[in-house]
Image (tube, rainbow, N blue to C red):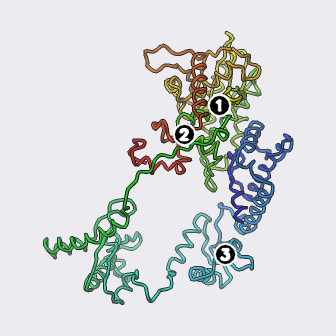
Amino acid sequence: MARAAQASTVPARRPPWRAPTRDRGAGDRAVARYAAASRDRRPRARLRAFPRRAGQAARRRDLVAARDGARARLRDNELNQAEGLIARLQAALAPLEGMTSSKPYDFAELAARHREVLIALSGDRNGVAIVFEERAGASLASAFDELLAKQQPSGLMTPLADYPEVFQTAFADRMVRRPESARAQLNIFGQLEARLTESDRVILGGLVEGVWPPASRIDPWLSRPMRHELGLDLPERRIGLSAHDFAQLLGHDEVILTHAAKVGGAPAVASRFLHRLEAVAGEARWKAATSAGETYVQYAAELDRPDKVEPIPQPEPRPPREARPLKMSVTAIEDWLRDPYTIYARYILKLDPLDPVDMPLSAADRGSAIHEALGEFTQVYADALPPDTLRTLREIGAKYFAPLMERPEARALWWPRFQRIAAWFAEWEQARRGQIEAIKAEIRGEIGIPLDDARTFTLSARADRIERRDDGSFAILDYKTGQPPTGKQVRMGLSPQLTLEAAILREGGFAEIPAGSSVGDLVYVRLSGNNPPGEQRSLELKIKTSDTPQPPDEAADSARRKLEALIRAFDDEQQAYTSLNLSMWANRYGAYDDLARIKEWSAAGGLGIEEW
């Protein structure tokens, strides 16, 4: 079971078809079959296993991601175990599978289905539901039994989203206590229990406003006169009872009064009882009492004080040369420059971050849908635009946004933004087509960089768009749904994606583009869907405003030389993969910060970052 669970959570890049569906089990089984088929070298078998809802471009991209990712490393028996686990989970969750959030259900019916699922999920080999064992389980079982004993509707119609709160409210009065030990030297009691016991030392904890005394509840339905006429207690009665408990417990031989400095992360206000006691005792007696209490505060501090403080050094992994990667994409080079430890964890340790269970849609999903739509449009209509460019683009976009439209944020925000992007892109495309002779979209390319001992490093790229202009030069464009890098960052070599794609082009790494071709323009096309919906940004490669912009060809050659120097530096086994070499982009990373133990060694001043 443990191995099956581990195999079922092996990550891969989430394809667009991983949208929420009613039959979650079927979707998860499709993932397992897709992972198995992606290892098949026959293209037809891989495409048959992939759901038809995704487009051709998405299928190709996700097949490569799965084949190169962690799922491809699973053995057949592990995939079978994962599929078997998914099937068993689907069977256990079947009582809840057919319920919808569009209508309410009777509370008793929901509780009955809830109990069935708990029994199925917690049953052992003998069919015994271990969830109902011991004291807590017995109390839960009795709660279900009392609710379902009459085997008739409760009359309380409950929406699915409200069921957890209704269930908690219905059974909140049930208390489950651990078995008491006669030899226990410390007992934790409530105020009522504490009145009935005698102890050598009493600690009164939680002496903050809102806890002791409790906050007065404001009744929106019954005013004070109405409560008085109905014979109900006034809200202040609870404060009086808590004051009585406080005074009674102060009568023990030794009493320690404590209050929290913070509650829920916010500064707490000490109880009014403490302030009144301070006023009655007088300054001298109160100082003597607080001085006596400082002894226990020091005891508590000593528990956490180490004998010796030794700063932890920054991890500096130095894997052997044969373990170091010899193939990367241009997008990974930026990670290599800024955070080499990310390369170490991802390409050498082969660790892939796991997505949270039922992860909500993110900006990456929106960006993928937009990229795929524009990529397919440009590929299909590379030679000539359709008669109705906007309509065609929206139809293609609807296909890629369809798997996301079950989520309200996609319907209310993302799709309207894409509509604005499509309108802008259609006008921009029509105006730009008159300046170019040919277009290549979603084109892959790579070059080899020779190293010592007959070894070669392969640099790969998938360019969003490459245009051949009227003058014979080429323009490289990249679509960005977020904030693109500035010309200064590209000129300094901190964001080398486009300049490295230009280097691949100049060395003949892209098909049908001869080596030695010239790159005349590097362009980021920002697609936000806001105002304006899109924006073309041709990079001016200069550091200062007064500088002369660096030509793209020169920038490409410079990026190629710097990359080779970086590769040769890390080809040395003495070169360590350290973390956050450029700390000004520290907030861009975080997937492997726990492995790099950043919060431990950076606290000693390693990064100079004040707060993590």
**Residue highlighted by disc 3:** 115
Q: Between marks 3 and 1, how big is the CA–CA gap? A: 50 Å
Image quadrant where residue 224 sits: bottom left
Residue sitting at 61 percent across and 65 percent down? 159
Sequence order check, earlier mark of 3 and 2? 3
**Residue highlighted by disc 1:** 422
Instruction: Determine the secondary structure under disc 3.
Output: helix
How many neighbours does mark 3 have within 10 angstroms: few (below 14), some (14-19), or many (20 or more)? some
Kindly identify the amino acid type of the residue bearing the numbered disc 1. Ala
Q: Is residue 561 above or below residue 250?
A: above
The spot of residue 537 in percent (x, y) is 55, 23
Which circle, 2 or 1, is nearer the viewer? 2
Residue sitting at 69 percent across and 71 percent down? 121
Which of the pair 293/302 is nearer the observer? 302
Which circle, 3 or 2, is nearer the viewer? 2
The spot of residue 339 in percent (x, y) is 53, 39
Res. 576 mark: 2
Q: Is residue 243 left or right of residue 586?
A: left
Q: Between marks 3 and 2, how big is the CA–CA gap? A: 54 Å
Q: Are marks 3 and 1 in contact (CB under 8 Å)?
A: no
